[in-house]
Image: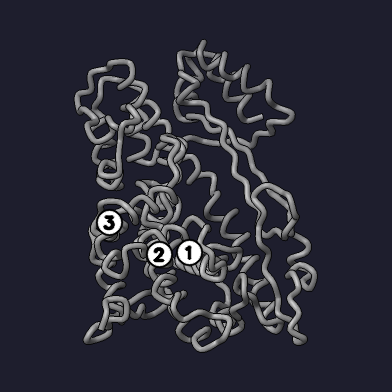
Amino acid sequence: MDYKHEKLFEEKVFKDPVHRYIHVRDKVIWDVIGTREFQRLRRIRQLGTTYLVFHGAEHSRFQHSLGVYEIVRRIIDDGFSGQKEWNGEERLLTLCAALLHDLGHGPFSHAFEKVFALDHEKFTQDILTGDTEVNKVLRRVSPDFPQKIADVIGKTYPDKLVVSLISSQIDADRMDYLQRDAYYTGVSYGHFDMERILRVMRPAEEQVVIKFSGMHAVEDYIMSRYQMYWQVYFHPVSRSAEVILMKILHRARHLHNSGYKFTYEPVQFTSFFDRTFGLKEYISLDEGVLMTYFQWWRNEKDEVLADLCDRFLNRRLFQYAEFDPATEYRKIGELEKLFKEAGIDPEYYLVTDSSSDLPYDFYRPGEENERVPIYLQMPSGELRELSRSSEIVDAISGKRRTDHKIYFPEDLLAAKRDENPLYDKILRMLKG
């Protein structure tokens, strides 16, 4: 039997709190899981700094990746198998893409990406096609197999149905992370009837569609996603921790570029500061590395770096206030001036941050970042865009919600407000 179709002598199972069991029969999948690049995902938290708000949110991208794989396996093995719209030859490719879709995430994911202007999807593709253990496993299927998976991740693969299972407005990625993140944070918002959705999913030429009778389960899924974003993913305290994390990296890079002599030299960051890093350096970083440096940098001579690291490690986070950039843009300039007069660097201690989400959108030809909508398969066989049948979804379609906040060290300002009226003035301005 060729490697592509080779099965394990005995099925392997992972016990999982969300899906109960994750089943592996394919030798390729088992071998990919054992590669160092995939095992690295155990050391990358799924929710970044959110554990500082919801103490149970310590789960990893390793767990999430297995979960996405299991959902896709159930969809194509239990639901799509034998249906004329589904090409069974794409099975292994789809399973591998599901398993490996987050392979390129860095430590603390999105915060790290913002500081160094990185794209985790590009790194996922680079790991798949580069000189890596996972590439060697995938090439045993066929020389072009790693590139095909990279094309699915990059949404350029010709079979759009395969792409939609991994990346769409109702995909396996979202269905896993909503439930998994709800479970580990302890909130109820992210729960929806996935079993019902899986039963009413149908393969179509271009994407997955939903049988009309399953519309209410999809409504529940979309509202679950909406609530999770605003109650968990955009939680202001988690954003405060992320702001401090980003400022630590900004400060370390600034010090490096200024010729500062670190007591604990950031050797594993130097190539990132100098923009000379490659795939090897990227893969070598995980959250354990960052946290080790933060521990060391608490004792650096540079007061800003030491303070920021101490704040992050010991959860002495910045306070926040609502901020409307449309009407309060002058306020930032005034506050920056007052911070400088008070001897506090506004570059690191006065930060504006915005969060924005579009819970569901429909296709508008010619618009940038068009979103392929969710289609319902009507009893007649006609495909109808979801918001045309659902009043709930129609009410939120195309409506982007944005939230702006300003972050500042209230503890530092409050401690000195009695000895210097300037600190009191700053606090009063920040608190409105």
Circles 3 and 1 in contact, beta carbons < 8 Å: no
Q: Which of the colour schemes (rainbow, by chain, secondary structure, one colour) is used?
A: one colour
Residue with the mark numbered 3: 37
- Quarter occupied by the C terminus: top right
Disc 3 to disc 2, how far (Cα)? 15 Å
> Among all residues in the image, which is located at the extreme bottom?
82
Q: What residue type is labelled 1?
A: Tyr
Residue 190 or 410: which is nearer the viewer? 190
Q: Which residue is drawn at 29% across and 54% down?
A: 43
Mark toward the viewer: 3 or 2: 3
Residue 85 location in percent, x, y?
58, 81
Structural crowding at the residue carrying mark 2, measured as other residues with C-alpha within 10 Å and reported as few (<14), some (14–19) or many (≥20): many
Residue with the mark numbered 1: 177
First-in-chain label (3 vs 2): 3
Q: Is residue 240 left or right of residue 266?
A: right
Q: Which residue is drawn at 39% across and 46% down?
A: 108
Structural crowding at the residue carrying mark 1, measured as other residues with C-alpha within 10 Å and reported as few (<14), some (14–19) or many (≥20): many
Residue with the mark numbered 2: 64
Q: Residue at x 21, y 27 (%)?
A: 265
> Among all residues in the image, which is located at the extreme front?
143
Q: Which amino acid does label 2 sit on?
A: His
Q: Residue at x 73, y 70 (%)?
A: 386
- Quarter occupied by the N terminus: bottom left
Residue 167 location in percent, x, y?
53, 62
Q: In this view, does 149 lie to the left or right of 236?
A: left
Q: What residue type is labelled 3?
A: Glu
First-in-chain label (1 vs 2): 2
First-in-chain label (3 vs 1): 3
Circles 1 and 2 in contact, beta carbons < 8 Å: yes
Disc 1 to disc 2, how far (Cα)? 7 Å
Vertical arrangement, residue 380 with respect to residue 145, above or below: below
